[in-house]
Image (cartoon, helix red, strand yellow):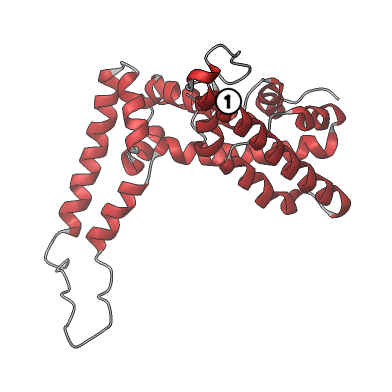
């Protein structure tokens, strides 16, 4: 079957020798979004309007700063500050008095609009939002390929499993895309891939620990030299 444009990132990731193909897609997507945000796009009004509203999380503001486009980042953050100041000035006016809970009433005070607003911008991130939407499309594409292409099913069977987060995403999403016997066989395969590869990594990590014991000093490393960063990816979804 001729490869379609939307299937290329998924097929490429499942051809890699990695602990989680979806982590690989996510990291590639994140790099592209950092470059996009710090490229000419920051001068476009529609992009600036969204970044001004959402801002960035701690992780992504650090990555944007490391991009070295300091002028671009300054312009983006200036717009975000302008909007935040304007919104806070409006919400912190006379109508935003704090409600003090009564000693005699158990009912909690209603939410304060200013606090709700600050919570909203604290939890929002332009890049996280774009990533979440695209990863959802990648997950849908995994199931599309699994259902339609024999070659992809073979690559899926041969992969090294998934990190905890992406195993959960595939497990939880499967009933939306597959039915009947195909769903049952997919879930069985997914569980087997996850557990078999977790146990493989468990053995590698155990041997890595053994190598710090003088009794094993002269033994070969086998596949354990990079067991620690691979374990971090499996558990936390962080590629070192």
The front one of 189 and 201 is: 201
Q: Where is residue 231 in the image (x, y as percent from the top left)?
A: 54, 31
Asked if residue 48 can be seen in this view, the reply is: no
Which residue is depicted at the point 63% across and 39% down? 137
Which residue is depicted at the point 35% across and 18% down? 67
Q: Where is 240 relative to 236, above or below?
A: above
Say few, some or many: other residues with alpha carbon within 10 Å of mark 1 (under 14 / 14 to 19 / 20 or more).
many
Q: Where is residue 183 in the image (x, y as percent from the top left)?
A: 81, 50
Which residue is depicted at the point 28% across and 82% down? 107
Left-right relation of 8 to 189? left
How many marks do you count on the picture?
A: 1
Which residue is depicted at the point 43% across and 20% down? 35
Residue furthest left as drawn = 94
Instruction: Quadrant for the N terminus, please.
Output: top right
Left-right relation of 212 to 58? right
Per the image, the residue denoted by label 1 is: 207
Left-right relation of 40 to 71? right
């Amino acid at each position: 079957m001729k490869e379609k444009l939307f299937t290329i990132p998924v097929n490429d990731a499942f051809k890699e020798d990695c602990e989680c193909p979806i982590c690989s897609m996510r990291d590639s997507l994140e790099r592209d979004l950092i470059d996009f945000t710090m490229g000419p796009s920051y001068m476009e009004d529609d992009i600036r309007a969204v970044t001004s509203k959402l801002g960035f999380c701690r992780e992504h503001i650090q990555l944007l700063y490391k991009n070295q486009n300091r002028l671009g980042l300054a312009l983006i953050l200036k717009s975000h500050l302008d909007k935040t100041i304007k919104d806070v000035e409006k919400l912190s006016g006379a109508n935003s008095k704090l409600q003090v809970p009564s000693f005699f009433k158990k009912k909690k005070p209603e939410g304060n609009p200013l606090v709700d607003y600050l919570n909203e911008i604290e939890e929002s991130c332009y890049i996280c939002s774009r990533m979440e939407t695209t990863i959802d499309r990648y997950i849908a594409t995994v199931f599309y390929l699994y259902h339609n292409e024999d070659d992809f099913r073979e690559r899926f069977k041969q992969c090294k499993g998934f990190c905890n987060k992406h195993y959960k995403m595939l497990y939880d999403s499967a009933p939306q895309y597959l039915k009947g016997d195909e769903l049952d066989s997919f879930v069985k395969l997914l569980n087997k891939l996850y557990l078999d590869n977790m146990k493989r990594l468990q053995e590698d990590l155990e041997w890595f620990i053994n190598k710090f014991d003088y009794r094993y000093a002269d033994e070969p490393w086998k596949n354990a030299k990079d067991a620690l960063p691979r374990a971090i990816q499996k558990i936390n979804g962080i590629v070192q």
